Amino acid sequence: MARHWNRTTYPGVRFREHPSRKHNGKADRYFSIRYYVNYKDCEEGLGWASDGWNPEKAHKVLAKIKEGITTGIGAQSLGDLRAEAEARRAKETNEAKLSKVQSMTLSAFFTQYYLPEAERTKRTWKDDNGRIERHINAKLGSFPLCAITKEDIKAFLDFLRKERLSEATALHHMAILRRAFNMARAVVIEGIPLFAGPSPLDGVALPKPKNARERFLSYAEADKLLEAAQESGHADLHAAIVIALNTGMRLGEILRLEWIDVDMAHGIITVREEADRKPGGKVFINTEVDAVLRKRISSRRHSRLVLAPPKGGKERSSLTHRFSDLVEHLGFNADIEDARHKVVFHTLRHTFASWLALAGTDIYRIKTLMRHKTITMTMRYAHLIPDATRSAVHNLRPSNGATRS
């Protein structure tokens, strides 16, 4: 059956009625437009009244198409109009996505991306979390990540220094920020990279820590420390001090040491290589360490660890606090303000290397025994090694007191 078209009050707009379907109590109407282009009559259907079409709306569409045909600018057909509308919707969608990405704050990025990844891959992620909560979020957390500038980073560094944080601690904060921006480059939200372009840390002069410890114990101080540890009744503390002084092992390495890593027959301790930790390797058991280990070897059947952890506590913090109490009791840190000169547990490792140097051990053997990554780290002990240059200053005058000519 042929379609019956009806005219509207708008030239070029007409409609036909559906034989049975109703809309607002009347027959549903289908609207179309007719126009002349390229010497041809063209008619295109728009849609039903039930879909939102009416004569006025159809007329506006027709007028826009005629304007395009007349001026040669813009849509010249219904297809062109629909393509323009689709492009506009796509642009608006992309702008909305971009706005969502650009509005993500640094604090939100830490919560949603950085910390979950750090918890999975970084042993010290809790340290990062503490620095983020205490300082980074306090000054930069509310900033959109994409909007943080080099000047913002410099201002943050100034803030850390006003808070009297050490240069080493400030450098840790910079490392977190650098990792955050590097990570953000790999994050894509709805097809849009979270961060692009240079990092705001590029070109910022980073802190240069001067925290190399210079203090080491004299033989007499070491004897006092060992005697006090023995008298304290804390066998683990005494054992840890003996091992550190005589092997240069770090506190964490001592606390993780298992009996399976101790070869008493050959006098060797194996410090395991582990990801995200300091280099492992072999250390050697001298008579002092041998005596301590043999005294404790009976506890081997009770624990796989050489130093058994306390019940319901953390051995690292427990040992550290006991060591600090011991040092305070002995007065080793009295009236000392510079942290480099204070005695802490790590001083024992420094003492081990210093004693090696004073005994004339060459710098390459010290590097091997300390398990340093580079010789540069070991060279700080070179000045302690006796040589002819040192003895020269003691021979400024002839021994018989005669004058020089």
Image (tube, rainbow, N blue to C red):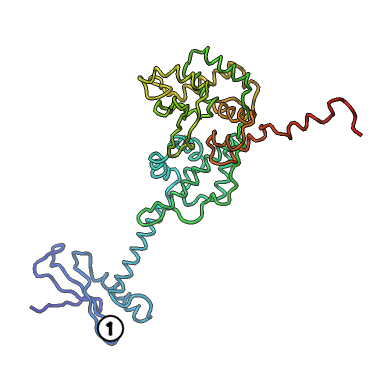
**In the image, farthest residue toward the front:** 265
The number of numbered discs placed on residues in the rendered structure image is: 1
- Quick one: quadrant of the N terminus? bottom left
Q: Secondary structure at mark 1?
A: strand
Residue that appears at 33% across and 63% down: 89
Up/down of 12 relative to 390, above or below: below
Up/down of 91 relative to 284, above or below: below
- Quick one: quadrant of the C terminus? top right
Nearest the eye: 264 or 197: 264
Residue beneath disc 1: 36
**In the image, farthest residue toward the bottom:** 39
Up/down of 64 relative to 229, above or below: below
Q: Which image quarter: residue 211? A: top right
Is 256 displayed left or right of 229 in the figure?
Answer: left
Question: Horizontal and vertical percent for residue 69?
Answer: 34, 80
Amino acid of disc 1? Tyr
Q: Which image quarter: residue 386? A: top right
Q: From this viewpoint, is residue 120 visible?
A: yes
Nearest the eye: 400 or 241: 400
Question: Horizontal and vertical percent for residue 262?
Answer: 43, 27
Question: Horizontal and vertical percent for residue 258?
Answer: 41, 27
Q: From this viewpoint, is residue 165 visible?
A: no
Question: Horizontal and vertical percent for residue 111?
Answer: 40, 41
Query: Badge 1 local density, few (<14 within 10 Å), some, or many (20+)?
Result: few
Nearest the eye: 351 or 141: 351
**In the image, farthest residue toward the right:** 405
Is 277 displayed left or right of 399 in the figure?
Answer: left
Residue that appears at 63% across and 18% down: 220
Residue that appears at 56% across and 39% down: 170
Up/down of 206 relative to 15, above or below: above
